[in-house]
Image (cartoon, rainbow, N blue to C red):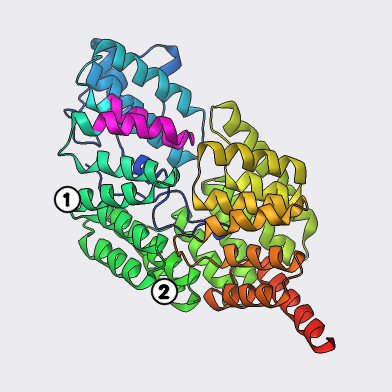
């Protein structure tokens, strides 16, 4: 099993998660669950699940396609191919692999409806990648029933429970995963479980344990990336930079580590280098969050035309993801609230909260309500976003601005101070906005 590959990036806009909802996806390669036999040459899938041969096609996918040409109803190979397509979508930021994954996994379950743990776990991973967390939970529970001693399926279960706001169940699944296999994937999730509860020291300790356990370059770079983000999200950009650069020495050119280094450099007052790193990350892996991060950094530097270009790319990517069955997420809601259509932001957030009642979505919904002038409702959602005790500067900034709009100046001041104390550089646009708001509140208090 591949122990861990870099997950989708920790968002400085939203939850600075050591492990995100689709981290489970990042743990899969063909046969990555340890449930399927190694794939040898053999192949085809139908057109919907096929991938043209060529140098860009990973060896595991080519091998599975060859295997299926000889035995087209091989349920294990089909399940492994489906998992490989989910992984390929993650590593390339190309959601067109999701329909291919669904086709392969469906064929696997048709060929072997019972006791098909690989395809069942693959369906859970696919649903999570598409942000359909209720379906991910259902499939993950079935996978656990089929493979109760496999630690990875507990990781998928934990991720689904987390994103559905079922935190005690998520923590229990993580503990079970650690008990079964105390390695990089399980310790990473344990780190995030502590971070959700506001214990960044324990979160850092478990992520350091994950690094100490890492025995491959991919595992080491994964852990170093998240250690960098933990440091930066808690106001220590120099340590963040050290971890990011160590990760890049381990895995040169890795997009997530370039993004981590960019954030650290921006916080340390080197925006030109940060822009260069983000441009390289986007060129390598055009994840929507990297594109948006680059746009906002450019906007903070007054380079509005260049920022607008990135925002256009972001909108196009969101449409591409939607066309391939991926539900809009907090990035889309916050983008519309901050840069686009306030009404659309509210619609996206409302839909998102129905399917993903996670604290990150509570915060996005709170902000969407705020920009639509519904601050009393926004405050209730902000309460939910902070209910677990997680230290998140952006959440506190949003709460501070909501309280200011409600005329609760002292409470607003307290929240904005907290945001900047957690991370003085939490956002290139809104950390300065927090300082401006504090100055205004101080002047108001002095004149009273």
Foreground residue among 347 and 269: 347
**292 shown above or below 29:** below
For the residue labelled by badge 1, is the local secondary structure a helix, a strand or a loop?
Answer: loop
Residue 32, magenta (yes or no): no
Q: Give the dominant element type of the magenta stretch: helix, strand or loop.
A: helix
Residue 106 visible: yes
The answer to which of marks 1 and 2 sits earlier in the sequence is 1
Say which residue label 2 marks: 242
| Residue 53 visible in the snapshot | no
> Where is residue 100 shown, x and y percent of the image?
44, 22
Q: Position of residue 170 (x, y in %)?
A: 33, 48
**Which residues are the magenta region?**
119-143
Which quadrant of the figure has residue 30?
A: top left
What is the C-alpha distance between the residues marked 1 and 2?
A: 29 Å
Horizontal and vertical percent for residue 146?
A: 19, 28
Q: Is residue 369 left or right of residue 41?
A: right
Vertical placement of 433 versus 162: above or below?
A: below
Q: Residue at (70%, 44%) from the top-left corner?
A: 345
| Quarter containing the N terminus | top left
Q: Secondary structure at mark 2?
A: helix
Q: Give the residue drawn at x 41%, y 60%.
A: 196
Q: Residue at x 61, y 51 (%)?
A: 364
Residue shown at 18% from the left, 32% from the top: 147
Res. 181 mark: 1
- Tell me, yes or no, whether the two marked residues, 1 and 2, touch with CB atoms within 8 Å: no
- Residue 134 sits in which quadrant? top left
């Amino acid at each position: 099993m591949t122990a861990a590959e870099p997950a989708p990036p920790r968002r400085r806009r939203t939850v600075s998660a050591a492990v995100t909802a689709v981290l489970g996806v990042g743990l899969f390669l063909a046969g990555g669950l340890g449930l399927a036999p190694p794939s040898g040459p053999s192949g085809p899938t139908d057109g919907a699940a096929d991938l043209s041969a060529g140098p860009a096609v990973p060896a595991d996918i080519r091998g599975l396609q060859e295997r299926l040409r000889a035995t087209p109803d091989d349920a294990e190979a089909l399940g492994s191919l489906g998992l490989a397509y989910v992984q390929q979508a993650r590593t390339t930021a190309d959601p067109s692999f999701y329909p291919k994954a669904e086709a392969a996994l469906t064929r696997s379950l048709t060929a072997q409806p019972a006791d098909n743990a690989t395809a069942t776990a693959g369906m859970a991973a696919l649903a999570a990648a598409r942000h359909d967390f209720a379906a991910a939970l259902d499939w993950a529970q079935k996978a656990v029933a089929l493979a109760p001693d496999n630690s990875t399926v507990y990781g998928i279960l934990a991720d689904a429970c987390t994103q559905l706001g079922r935190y005690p169940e998520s923590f229990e699944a993580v503990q079970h995963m650690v008990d079964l296999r105390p390695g990089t994937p399980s310790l990473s999730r344990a780190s995030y479980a502590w971070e959700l509860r506001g214990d960044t020291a324990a979160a850092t300790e478990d992520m350091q344990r994950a690094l100490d356990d890492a025995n491959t370059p991919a595992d080491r770079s994964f852990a170093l990336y998240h250690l960098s983000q933990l440091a930066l999200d808690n106001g220590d950009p120099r340590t963040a930079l050290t971890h990011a650069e160590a990760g890049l020495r381990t895995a040169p050119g890795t997009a997530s580590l370039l993004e981590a280094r960019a954030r650290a450099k921006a916080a340390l007052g080197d925006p030109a280098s940060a822009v260069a790193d983000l441009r390289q990350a986007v060129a390598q892996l055009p994840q929507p969050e990297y594109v948006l991060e680059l746009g906002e950094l450019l906007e903070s530097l007054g380079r509005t035309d260049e920022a607008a270009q990135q925002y256009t790319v972001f909108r196009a990517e969101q449409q591409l993801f939607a066309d391939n069955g991926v539900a809009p997420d907090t990035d889309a809601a916050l983008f519309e609230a901050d840069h686009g259509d306030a009404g659309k932001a509210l619609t996206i957030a409302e839909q998102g909260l129905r399917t993903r009642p996670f604290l990150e979505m509570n915060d996005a919904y709170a902000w969407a309500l705020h920009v639509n002038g519904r601050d009393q409702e926004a405050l209730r959602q902000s309460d939910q976003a902070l209910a677990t005790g997680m230290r998140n500067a952006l959440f506190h900034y949003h709460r501070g601005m909501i309280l200011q709009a409600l005329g609760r100046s002292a409470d607003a001041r307290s929240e904005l101070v907290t945001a900047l104390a957690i991370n003085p550089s939490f956002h290139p646009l809104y950390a300065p906005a927090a300082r401006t708001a504090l100055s205004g509140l101080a002047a108001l208090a002095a004149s009273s």
